[in-house]
Image (cartoon, rainbow, N blue to C red):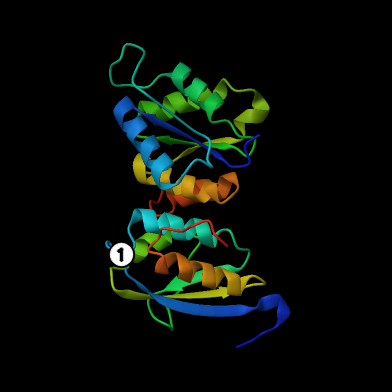
Amino acid sequence: MNRNVGIVIVSHSPDVAKGAADMVRQMVGKDVPLAWCGGDPDGRLGTSVDAIEKALQTAWSDRGVVIMVDMGGAETNSEMAIERLPEKKRAKVVVCNAPIVEGSVMAATESSGGSPLDKVRHAAEELYPRM
Amino acid sequence: MSQDERALRATGFTMLTHEHGFHARPSIMLTQLAKQFSAKVWIGLSDNGPWTDAKSIARVMALKAPQQTMVFFAAEGTDATDAVSALVRLVQSDFTSSKDQ
């Protein structure tokens, strides 16, 4: 079982999502459950509820998971993916309101120290007040 | 300086020689190391502050300390001395050693 909060990175572009995940792995390390997804099922820019659902399973931690999104549909599709989870898991997933790259690195840094879900979310959102 | 057992306080400082100052990677390493201690840990660019929470990645990155800056650490808690010496070592090692105690 993972002792650290997981991170899921959801971008319209698979390149952006993978690049942000690479930054997390190289800068923060391997102590954080991490998954990314991007692009729609036809390979165009977009996001997919199925892919997000799968990423949530990959990065799952009983301490919770934060989802980092880029814009628009990434957030609504993430919320739909959360709704597919069993009820007791749903409360452990939050979508962060933060820039996807910086937010992912900051959330992962906080998570790597063993912080709980709300602190990980706060670290990602700290410099960027809710719009 | 108070040496009360429950609230040990320690301070230390060193020169930041890292080529690019406190950029992303060094900030992350410093924050991760600070988090390994139960003491409260602060970092500052002068010996009388202002002090920044060394466990907050956003705040440590926002310091933007350039190369050849003196960095100061202060810690309060039972492992304060260990925390300060570990952080000083990390900076002195030019951020090559991180997880050592």
Pointer 1 local density, CA inside 10 Å: few below 14, some 14–19, many at least 20:
some
Residue A12 in view (yes/no) = no
Residue shown at 45%/19% (left/top)? A51
Image quadrant occupied by the C terminus of chain A: top left
> Which type of secondary structure does the marked residue at label 1 adopt?
loop
Above or below residue A42? Residue A84 is below
Image quadrant occupied by the N terminus of chain A: top right
The spot of residue A74 in percent (x, y) is 39, 28
Determine the residue located farthest toward the right in the rendered image.
Answer: B5
The spot of residue A89 in percent (x, y) is 63, 29
- The disc numbered 1 marks a residue on which chain? B
Residue shown at 33%/34% (left/top)? A19
Residue shown at 58%/59% (left/top)? B36
Type of the residue with mark 1:
Gly
Q: Specify whether B101 is left or right of A130.
A: right
Residue, disc 1: B21
Q: Specify whether A82 is left or right of B3.
A: left
